[in-house]
Amino acid sequence: MLAFTHTAAGCAFALLVAEYLHASPSQAILIVAGGILGSHLPDIDHPKSAFGSRVKPLSIPLSAIFGHRGITHSLLAVVGMYGLIWWVFNVVHWQRGYAVPVVVGVAVGYLSHLLGDWMTNSGVPLLWPSKRRFVAPLKLCTGDLREYVLAFAMYGWSVMDCVRVFHTI
Ligand SMILES: [Zn+2]
């Protein structure tokens, strides 16, 4: 799935969660920012991905050891990421009022990435180290017309939702 689509999904799902949690506008912005960041994190295992190309000292060894769509696209990575983020926040004593929405956003974005890759024909190894790939019946090819339609629908919905939320405050 394209980075463009992952960004759309991270933003749309973060907005949905912000609404579900009745987040204030400032909390919603933090959740969406975290959602966009989290939507790219799993591709840290691909040195040519939008995110991996910016952190090559990490992405190159991760790619060499695990390959693309390996551990970072598994349920194990989701659990590990949560533990790591909470540990970092506790060590630096970040104000929880700001940290929690960001952590929620990153988690939602991360999950939206796995959901997006699950919808492609390559699937995701949710039960890594098992090599079994889980694939949704939709089986999108990365960059095909259906992906663009999906991405633009999510961007459109996100913009309309932001206009609606900020118009009412
Ligand atoms: Zn991915």
Image: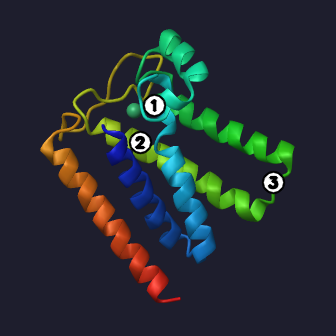
Q: Which mark is residue 113?
A: 2
Helix, strand, or loop for circle 1?
helix
Helix, strand, or loop for circle 2?
helix
> Badge 1 local density, few (<14 within 10 Å), some, or many (20+)?
many
Q: What's under tag 2, amino acid-wise?
A: His
Q: Earlier in the sequence, mark 3 or mark 1?
A: 1
> Badge 2 local density, few (<14 within 10 Å), some, or many (20+)?
many
Q: Earlier in the sequence, mark 1 or mark 2?
A: 1
Q: What's under tag 1, amino acid-wise?
A: Asp
Q: What's under tag 3, amino acid-wise?
A: Trp
Marks 3/1: CA distance? 26 Å
Tally of numbered discs: 3
Residue 82, how many percent across, how many down?
64, 41
Report whether residue 106 is seen. yes
Q: Which residue is mark 1?
A: 43
Q: Is residue 64 left or right of residue 149?
A: right
Residue 87 vertical position relative to residue 72 in the rendered view, above or below: below
Marks 2/3: CA distance? 26 Å
Label 1 CB-ligand 1 distance < 8 A: yes
Label 2 CB-ligand 1 distance < 8 A: yes
Residue 50, how many percent across, how many down?
43, 35
Report whether residue 74 is seen. no
State which mark lies toward you, 1 or 2.
Answer: 1
Q: Which residue is mark 3?
A: 94
The image quarter containing residue 68 is: top left
Q: Which mark is residue 138?
A: none
